[in-house]
Image: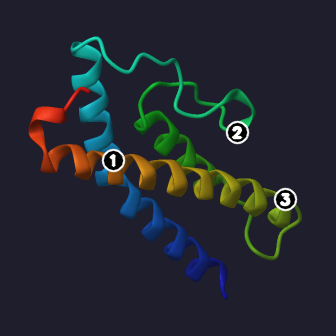
Amino acid sequence: MTNQELHEQLTAQLKNFYHPAIEADEFLTLLSKRKVGKFSAIFAAESGFKANSNRFLPYMEELVEDQQALPKTNEEGFDVGIAAFLGKLQQMHNVLGQFSEQLKEKKSTPSNIGE
């Protein structure tokens, strides 16, 4: 796989997370206004993310920055950089996926929103 192909795949993956992250953040804002679901960060400090937020978009921004900063596939440091990036990407996939599933369930029964 060429460097360009890799970056295109990573960019496509990040784009797939963007709208669910926005929807999740909107729902988290609603919960916050209702004084429900109080927490300080989506990912734990040891997750590898530098961001520390109770919303998804700061983590998405970090992933985009990390992806843009990756060395080329044939450069020194690529293996370490891509491993760290893919670890964070996998965490985002897991947490955002779980959150999106719960959000779909809540939307199917509107009276449950905020519970």
Q: Secondary structure at mark 2?
A: helix
Question: Label 1, label 2: how many angstroms apart (C-alpha)?
Answer: 22 Å
Q: Nearer the viewer, residue 111 or 40?
A: 111
Query: Left or right: where does residue 58 sit relative to residue 113?
Result: right
| Picture residue at 10% right of the left edge, 33% below the top | 111
Q: Nearer the viewer, residue 84 or 74?
A: 84
| Label drawn at residue 47 | 2
Crowding around mark 2 (Cα neighbors within 10 Å: few <14, some 14 to 19, many 20+) is few
Q: Secondary structure at mark 3?
A: helix
The kind of residue on which mark 3 rests is: Val
Q: Position of residue 39 (x, y in %)?
A: 48, 19
Query: Left or right: where does residue 100 sit relative to residue 39?
Result: left
Q: Which quarter of the rendering shows the N terminus? A: bottom right
Q: Given this view, does label 3 or label 1 mark the residue nearer the observer?
A: 1
Residue sticking out furthest to the top: 35
| Picture residue at 52% right of the left edge, 75% below the top | 9
The residue beneath circle 1 is 102
Q: Secondary structure at mark 1?
A: helix
Question: Label 3, label 2: how many angstroms apart (C-alpha)?
Answer: 16 Å
| 67 up-or-down from 75: above or below | above
